[in-house]
Image (cartoon, rainbow, N blue to C red):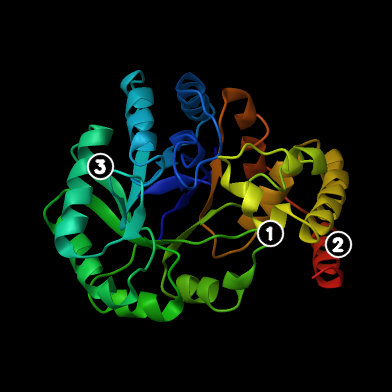
Amino acid sequence: METRQFGKTDLKTTLIGFGAWAIGGGDWKFGWGPQDDNDSVAAIHRALDLGINWIDTAAIYGMGHSEDVVRRALAERSERPYIFTKCSRVWDAQGNIDSDLHAASVRREAEDSLRRLSVDVIDLYQIHWPRPDEDIEEGWTTLAELQAEGKVRHIGVSNFGVEQMRRAQGIAPIASLQPPYSMIRRDIEAEILPFCREHNIAVIVYSPMQSGLLSGAMTRERAANLPPNDWRGSNPEFQEPRLSRNLLLVNVLAEMAEQHRCSVGEVAIAWTLRHPAVTGAIVGARSADQLDGIVGAAEVRLTGAELNQIETFLQEHP
């Protein structure tokens, strides 16, 4: 699979990375419903077989469970992909989730992630959310210290705005930004992507298929019958009136997928990868079979006419 330079770092990452949010399971506030760990391990193995060379997870995914599953999957393999994880989202014994960027909390999270992942160093350690905003400097300073100590190789941010990145840059360079980006969520195009390109900050976008909505597998019936512990059931994009508009968009993408002999999801992912500021796309998979409808996105090149058709639809259906 094609690789790209990861910003100013020495990493070269594949255009697609394995996203480990959903494999955290359904037993927490932002779960995706029931998930079999054996399926998760098989999905990671299939991703590696297909050439994907990085995995993005977070301590909060399944409240530590996603990192545990990643460790289990990699223990059975000889090759070692890059492992990216995140801090700042913490939980208590009752499963209540909060944000903490104080130095002691960040250090505790880093040590816990190193232990769960069973690695000596984390390839990319990211602040998951810039919350509380007033503690960004303390949190980022701590990440820089962890990097100097050799516990993490590179440090990045997730869900940060331009001014928040400027504040962090005053302390230590930012290797990467992880923002949401899809045809449905395009707000980063105006300021954030140009800023990252200007400062050579790698951009790894998450939810390029809008959490499965643009995968081609989501139907009106499936959206209406998502499990109670699947967070998407309460997301406005999966409800009317937006659901009908989003499914119309899927129909447009389906025609393009037929022309390119690929999946609808691969068209959606390829659309994000066409932006010159985007380094790679994080794509989750809950089974090995799902990977076969994902990795082809790295090879899909949408034509100018197709990009114009998508743009016209988005403007006519805001």
Q: Which secondary structure lies at badge 2?
A: helix
- Residue type (three-letter) at the residue carrying disc 1: Pro
Q: Position of residue 267 (x, y in %)?
A: 73, 47
Identify residue for label 1: 236
Cα gap from disc 3 to disc 2, whole angstroms: 44 Å
Asked if the residue at tag 3 contacts the one at tag 1, i.e. Cβ–Cβ closer than 8 Å, the answer is no
Q: Position of residue 17 (x, y in %)?
A: 49, 42
Q: Which quadrant, please, contains the N terminus?
A: top right
Identify residue for label 2: 309
Nearest to the observer: residue 226 or residue 135: 226
Q: Which secondary structure lies at badge 1?
A: helix
154 to the left or right of 231: left
Asked if the residue at tag 2 contacts the one at tag 3, i.e. Cβ–Cβ closer than 8 Å, the answer is no
Q: Which quadrant, please, contains the C terminus?
A: bottom right
Cα gap from disc 1 to disc 3, whole angstroms: 32 Å
Q: Residues within 10 Å of mark 3 (few under 14, many from 20)?
A: many
The circle on residue 168 is none
272 to the left or right of 129: right
Look at 51% across and 30% down and name the residue there.
47
